[in-house]
Image (tube, rainbow, N blue to C red):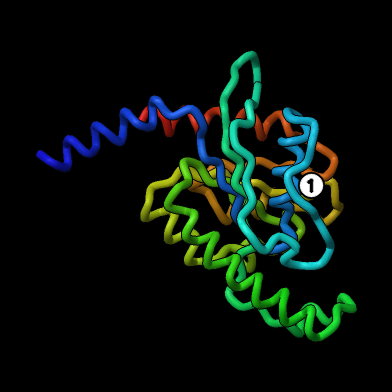
């Protein structure tokens, strides 16, 4: 009885909720912030966060509320949640090759580790998750088991983005083969290649979420 009432309230809450929490998850330097920036630039005219070649540039969850996205004459309000890159281990020595001082490298490693914990906690608030992967790299080396386990357990709709299709080494088929259970769309967040298909998939998956 109580569970039924709760489920009805949860369903009502989602249907009447204005913003859909769209979270960007994935490994460091896959292009999560670049994609969030692309959406913000397309619909707000400004970027969300800073990008860099140095891993773990984003070390805190950053978000932008009420981003009204339009596709094919339809509109939808999103809360974009850009999370730190998920990694099993963050070693400060990995930053030294980017000519960072040892003290700065240790500080970045500590912040990145804290950011990963924060990102996993934010899964509780996600309505839809976009897992951003580097299409030039092996997908099995990029996905964190903890994240996938949480997504499955919480039954959160997932869209896989194979980013960096502008590069010659990009292989979307390899990404699709690794995740046959999820929709996969290949894009270039940097140049906006195929971004319309991304918006279409976001609308489709969000619509399915609302029906539940």
- Residue 129: percent from left, percent from top: 53, 46
Question: Would you say residue 176 is visible in this rendering?
Answer: no
- Residue 59: percent from left, percent from top: 67, 63
- Whether residue 16 sits left or right of residue 116 in the image: it is left
Q: Residues within 10 Å of mark 1 (few under 14, many from 20)?
A: many
In percent of the image, x 71 and y 29: which residue is there? 196
Question: Would you say residue 166 is visible in this rendering?
Answer: yes
- Whether residue 122 sits left or right of residue 44 in the image: it is left
Question: Dot 1: what SS?
Answer: loop
- Position of residue 154 relative to residue 29, above or below, is above
Numbered-mark total:
1
Name which quarter of the figure residue 73 lies in. top right
- Whether residue 198 sits left or right of residue 155 in the image: it is right
Residue at the far left in the pictured view: 1
> Looking at the figure, which quarter contains the C terminus?
top left
Residue at the far right in the pictured view: 99
- Per the image, the residue denoted by label 1 is 165
- Whether residue 19 sits left or right of residue 105 in the image: it is left
- Residue 14: percent from left, percent from top: 38, 32
As rendered, which of 126 and 27 lies closer to the eye? 126
> Looking at the figure, which quarter contains the N terminus?
top left
Residue at the far top in the pictured view: 73
In percent of the image, x 16 and y 37: which residue is there? 4
- Position of residue 5 relative to residue 164, above or below, is above
In percent of the image, x 57 and y 24: which residue is there? 76
- Position of residue 147 relative to residue 212, above or below, is below
- Residue 201: percent from left, percent from top: 59, 32
In percent of the image, x 82 and y 45: which residue is there? 190
- Position of residue 83 relative to residue 200, above or below, is below
């Amino acid at each position: 009885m109580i569970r039924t009432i709760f489920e009805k309230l949860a369903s009502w809450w989602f249907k009447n909720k204005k913003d859909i929490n769209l979270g960007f998850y994935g490994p460091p330097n896959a292009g999560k912030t670049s994609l969030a920036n692309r959406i913000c630039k397309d619909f707000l005219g400004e970027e969300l966060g800073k990008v860099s070649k140095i891993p773990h540039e984003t070390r805190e969850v950053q978000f932008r509320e009420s981003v009204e996205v339009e596709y094919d004459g339809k509109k939808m309000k999103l809360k974009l949640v850009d999370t730190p890159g998920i990694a099993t281990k963050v070693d400060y020595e990995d930053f030294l090759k980017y000519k960072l001082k040892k003290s700065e490298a240790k500080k970045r490693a500590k912040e990145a580790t804290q950011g990963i914990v924060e990102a996993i906690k934010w899964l509780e608030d996600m309505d839809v998750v976009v897992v951003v992967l580097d299409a030039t790299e092996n997908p099995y080396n990029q996905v964190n088991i903890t994240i996938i386990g949480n997504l499955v357990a919480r039954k959160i709709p997932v869209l896989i983005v194979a980013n960096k299709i502008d590069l010659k080494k990009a292989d979307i088929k390899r990404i699709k083969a690794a995740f046959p259970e999820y929709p996969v769309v290949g894009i270039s967040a940097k140049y906006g290649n195929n971004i319309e298909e991304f918006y279409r998939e976001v609308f489709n998956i969000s619509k399915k979420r609302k029906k539940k």
